Image (cartoon, rainbow, N blue to C red):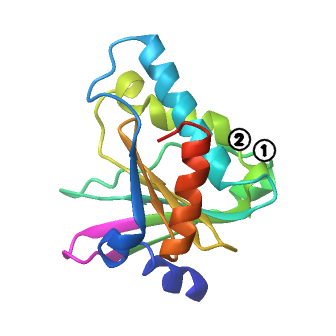
Amino acid sequence: MRQWINFYYYLPLERYEAHVLTVELGKEAMTDAQELFDVYQRALGIFECVFSMDDEVMLVINTYPCDGINPRPRSIKPYLKNERLHRTLNAFMEKGPHEEDIMHYYLTCRWGELKNKKLILHLCQHDLVKGVKPMNDYYFIQLEKKRCVRMQDDRFIDLIFKDETDKTRMIERLLAKNLL
């Protein structure tokens, strides 16, 4: 648990503004299946540039309870290839920087142990298919390289890097694959 708490303080975007790359995925409101497919393909391409199947990742889902309602993330079970991983899901609540409650759900696994394509598709179609719900933040943290990908829905992806050199290398990879 202590490792997670220390790593949590790495996440606030304000601290690492110079090392954050925000990539827009699509228009404000998608109107057809082709737009959804284009957003999904772009998001998938970005994730494939950042992660390899053997990378150790921490998946963090932050929910923001309000008015006594505790929004739970959609069950993570359908996105795990191994039932044993579901039993490693942890949770705790704390006060955020603006005194709001934040519920953290997290687990550590290999990128290849997630049904990552299915999870990315779910995030891309969150607003379109499921209707408007309280927003959850999904963080995919690459533990070894200390990179973080934050995705909320089909609008954008934040890529957070430990330094400017790592950010520059990733920009070059994304440009080479025509994702920027």
Closer-to-camera residue (40/45): 45
Magenta span has 97?
Answer: yes
Residue 42 point in image, percent of width and height: 53, 34
Q: Which residue appears at 53% of the width and 29% of the height?
A: 40
> Where on the picture, by quarter, is residue 29?
top left
Residue 132 point in image, percent of width and height: 28, 32
Q: Which residue appears at 45% of the width and 78% of the height?
A: 10
Amino acid type, label 2: Lys
Closer-to-camera residue (76/16): 16
Magenta span has 59?
Answer: no
Residue under pointer 1: 81
The reply to whether residue 128 is visible in this rendering is: yes
The reply to whether the C-beta atoms of the residues labelled 1 and 2 are less than 8 Å apart is yes
Q: Which residue appears at 56% of the width and 79% of the height?
A: 4
> Where on the picture, by quarter, is residue 111?
bottom right
Q: Which residues are magenta?
A: 94-103
Residue under pointer 2: 115
124 sits left or right of 65 in the view: right
Q: Are there few (<14), some (14-19), or many (20+) residues within 10 Å of tag 1? A: some
173 sits left or right of 42 in the view: right
Label placed on residue 180: none
- The image shows residue 144, relative to residue 160, as above or below, that is below
Residue 169 point in image, percent of width and height: 59, 62
